Image (tube, grey):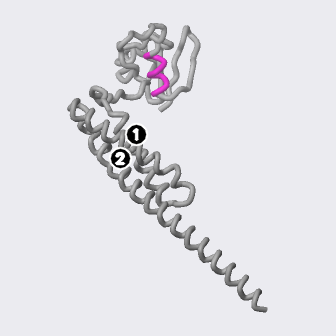
């Protein structure tokens, strides 16, 4: 529905009803200013028209500064933040043991020159894991890291075993190929001497 309003004797409009309510609530149109729409016999003060009474009795004052702590009608609804408990203490040695155990296990399986890196990592995983287990037994608040420490020690020992096994296989393969190549070269020398 479209409305007209009179401001200081000057006819304004047409405006939609919602827009006029905002103008009245903001104070741009006062309760004494005249309003009219199609179907009304005559102009009436905005404060006497039923649909504008609430807006004229509860005007908004945009010049008023916002009060701290007062919710803004334009702000998104506030959701409660999840309660955060105390920070959990962790054992850095247990974490280091687990990481070194994983690295050493992967490198020990790769073979070749990675064996040279996997053996020190595996030994450090076992050492850090055992130190972390002693630290955890002394401090119960670190009990949640016991699994890390144990897994680091286990993976470290497995990596040591695999690394030693790979070193033995590499050494045996190298020895076998060198003896085979030397025996084949000596047999060639014998064959050529007969001819």
Q: Residue furthest front?
A: 194
Q: Secondary structure beneath disc 1?
A: helix
Front residue of 102 and 81: 102
**Residue interval drawn in magenta:** 18-25
Residue of label 1: 96
Dot 2 or dot 1: first in sequence order is 1
Front residue of 167 and 36: 167
Q: Left of 109 or right of it: where is 145?
A: left
Q: Is residue 80 visible?
A: no
In the rendered image, which quarter is residue 81 located in? top left
Front residue of 155 and 39: 155
Q: Residue at x 40, y 13 (%)?
A: 59
Residue 49 horizontal/vertical position (percent): 38, 20
Marks 2/1: CA–CA distance = 8 Å
Q: Residue at x 50, y 29 (%)?
A: 16
Magenta segment includes 180: no
Count the marks. 2
Say the numbered circle drawn on residue 191. none
Q: Residue at x 29, y 46 (%)?
A: 150
Residue of label 2: 152
Q: Is residue 26 visible?
A: yes
- Asked if the residue at tag 1 contacts the one at tag 2, i.e. Cβ–Cβ closer than 8 Å, the answer is yes
Q: Residue furthest bottom?
A: 195
Q: Residue at x 53, y 51 (%)?
A: 116
Residue 30 horizontal/vertical position (percent): 46, 11
């Amino acid at each position: 529905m479209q409305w007209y309003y009179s401001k200081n004797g000057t006819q304004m409009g047409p405006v939609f009803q919602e827009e006029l309510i905002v103008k009245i609530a903001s104070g741009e149109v006062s309760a004494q200013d005249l309003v009219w729409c199609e179907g009304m016999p005559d102009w009436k003060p905005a404060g006497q028209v039923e649909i504008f009474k609430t807006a004229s009795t509860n005007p908004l004052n945009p010049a008023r500064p916002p009060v701290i702590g007062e919710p803004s009608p334009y702000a998104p609804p506030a959701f409660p933040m999840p309660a955060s408990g105390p920070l959990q203490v962790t054992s850095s040695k247990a974490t280091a043991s687990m990481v070194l155990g994983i690295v050493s296990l992967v490198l020990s399986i790769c073979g070749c020159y990675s064996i040279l890196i996997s053996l020190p990592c595996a030994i450090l995983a076992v050492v850090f894991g055992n130190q972390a287990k002693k630290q955890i037994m002394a401090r119960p608040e670190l009990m949640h890291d016991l699994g890390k420490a144990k897994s680091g020690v286990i993976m470290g020992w497995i990596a040591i075993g695999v690394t030693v096994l790979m070193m033995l296989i590499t050494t045996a393969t190298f020895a076998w190929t060198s003896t085979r190549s030397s025996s084949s070269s000596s047999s060639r020398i014998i064959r050529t001497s007969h001819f």
